[in-house]
Amino acid sequence: MITEAFPGQDSDFARRARENQSRLNADLKRSYDFIVCGAGSSGSVVARRLAENSNAEVLLIEAGGGDEAESVIDPALWPTNLGSERDWGFQAEPNPHLGGRELSMSMGKGLGGGSSINVMVWARGHKSDWDHFAAEAGDAGWGYESVLDIYRRIENWQGASDARFRGTDGPVWVQPAHDPHPLAHALLDAAREQGIPTFGSPNGAMMEGPGGGAITDMLVRDGRRQSLYRAYVHPVSDRPNLTIVTGAHVRRILFDRRRATGVEIEKDGRIFSIGARSEVILSTGAINTPKLLMLSGIGERAELERLSIPVVQNLAGVGRNMQDHVSFGCMWELSRPMAPRNSGSEATLYWKSRADLDAPDLLFCQVEFPVPSERTAALGVPDHGWTMFAGLAQPESRGRVRLRDADPAKPMVIDANMLSDPADIEAARACVKLCRDLGNGEAFKPFVKGEVMPRDRDDAGLDAFIRDSAVTYWHQCGTAKMGQDDMSVVDTSLSVHGIERLRIADGSIMPRVTTGNTQAPCAIIGEQAAARIRADHGL
Ligand SMILES: Cc1cc2nc3c(=O)[nH]c(=O)nc-3n(C[C@H](O)[C@H](O)[C@H](O)COP(=O)(O)OP(=O)(O)OC[C@H]3O[C@@H](n4cnc5c(N)ncnc54)[C@H](O)[C@@H]3O)c2cc1C
């Protein structure tokens, strides 16, 4: 295994890697052993792990461009990527449960995918999430202890040493937020005022029990973003057996009966096919992965026939089970301007909406500037404020994505369906109430002038605030879930049911959304896929 730390920061390596990739791109082959579609959080991991074996010829295809923009590298600039060419800019359908609002659903486009435009929070998920994955897959290999072992192997942890939970030899540089803002410390003090325990890191004992608060772990090194592409792929991009193609849109998967044989791509206005001698791996994210499956004839029969797409495999679960964390921006005005630090989000808190739960179902990320929805912005946003991005960690609502038509260029119909389940409104009330107790506590008094929203409201007013302020945490997942039931799309080794040589490795396969931000679980999904592919092909 290659474990050297980020040779990409060495300019000789960067030049060698660039020259290698220009050479390989100038001479694209008709076929490769493995084609990985999408260079995002999971796809980066799969491509790296396969390319570590020099006998495997790997093609990594990415629709977007490079990751060298200042807005990617500088942690403070992440919001400027939203709506840019680095964002797919998906738009959900009008949602009656949000007063008819149409939510923006950003997802990363370019090397690193979401991990190049996100807030850099590293959150492993709760013990119960992984045990749930194992139960759904019927495979203890997805259970908490196995996954903890993978986390220990992949992390290069920079905080206090902790042999039970942390590793220091892996490719992923993880550090506690550097020199956190006084507001981040205030949040932890406020948590203690409410009887919520605080921890040295959110990634350890805190996610084995009812929750707690901690300074955030981040993928930032020397003040620069360390995306999962930078961690995994960049250090091996000088290898002759790894070709990385950007600006190439995968349009569909090609089959010989029920065996995947390659992909059709569009690049520079030209449409052509590339063969996969061993496997195709789809890592195009929770919206484009079900889209590609359906365009290629894998999905619910009636849905495909409606669009005259020949059916390769009838799998009713494709595009269903869509999940996401929904968030409500509660806001306070600062008594004096305070510049955000790092990514502007350095403290995190997980807790329960009901005492009888044994795992957290609420998720709070503090943000050191105002984050209203387009509707709550109209209530008036202070020039200097902070936000509790307070959300549901285990929502009950499920959405669905479907094809608008059979043209790959057309956007999907995204029915995110947030807050459609009444249980979510119930949990949201508890969430906003806890948020107000925290923000109006003694700990914040030295910093704030007062609460801006939601303020005191009756029940109807509180519900209106919840529906008006709801936005996505950008954790879309679950649309091609792993499992054994009729609605599952992949099995425990992430192979598509009934299809040979086609796997899915990205957030789509989550049976349920993990309790927390989703890039770290997507890295685990990539590791799990790669380990199984290597075992199956003797790599
Ligand atoms: C604004 C924002 C903030 C976030 N903040 C955090 C955070 O702080 N911490 C955290 O853990 N998570 C965060 N997330 C979520 C996290 O980044 C995602 O859950 C994660 O990146 C999903 O990984 P993935 O591999 O499933 O897909 P992605 O990372 O989205 O990768 C999919 C890749 O496939 C490419 N692709 C798609 N379709 C095609 C096609 N047809 N042909 C070729 N390539 C294609 C895409 O361009 C993309 O590069 C955030 C996300 C966003 C958008």
Image (cartoon, rainbow, N blue to C red):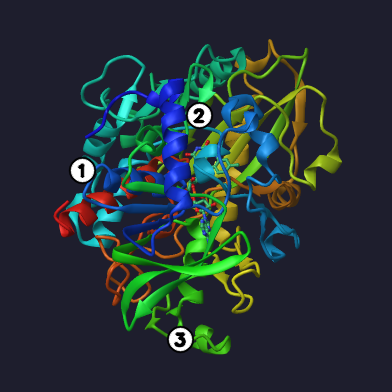
Of residues 216 and 428, the one nearer the viewer is 216
Between circles 3 and 1, the one closer to the viewer is 3
Checking the image for residue 146, the label placed there is 1
Tag 3 secondary structure: helix
Tag 2 secondary structure: strand
Q: Position of residue 10 (x, y in %)?
A: 43, 20
Horizontally, is 224 left or right of 174 in the view? right
Q: Is residue 249 above or below residue 129?
A: below
Between circles 2 and 3, the one closer to the viewer is 3
Tag 1 secondary structure: helix
First of labels 3, 1 by sequence position: 1
Write down the residue under mark 3: 301
Of residues 59 and 507, the one nearer the viewer is 59
Q: Residue at x 63, y 25 (%)?
A: 76
Q: Position of residue 401 (x, y in %)?
A: 56, 68
Horizontally, is 343 left or right of 29 in the view? right
Q: Quadrant of residue 438?
A: top right
Q: Amino acid at mark 1?
A: Ser
First of labels 1, 2 by sequence position: 1
CA distance separating discs 1 and 2: 25 Å
Between circles 1 and 2, the one closer to the viewer is 1
How many C-alpha atoms fall within 10 Å of the one at disc 3: few (<14), some, or many (≥20)? some
Of residues 484 and 27, the one nearer the viewer is 27
Q: Position of residue 162 (x, y in %)?
A: 25, 19
Write down the residue under mark 2: 348
Q: Amino acid at mark 3?
A: Arg
How many C-alpha atoms fall within 10 Å of the one at disc 1: few (<14), some, or many (≥20)? some
Q: Residue at x 81, y 40 (%)?
A: 377
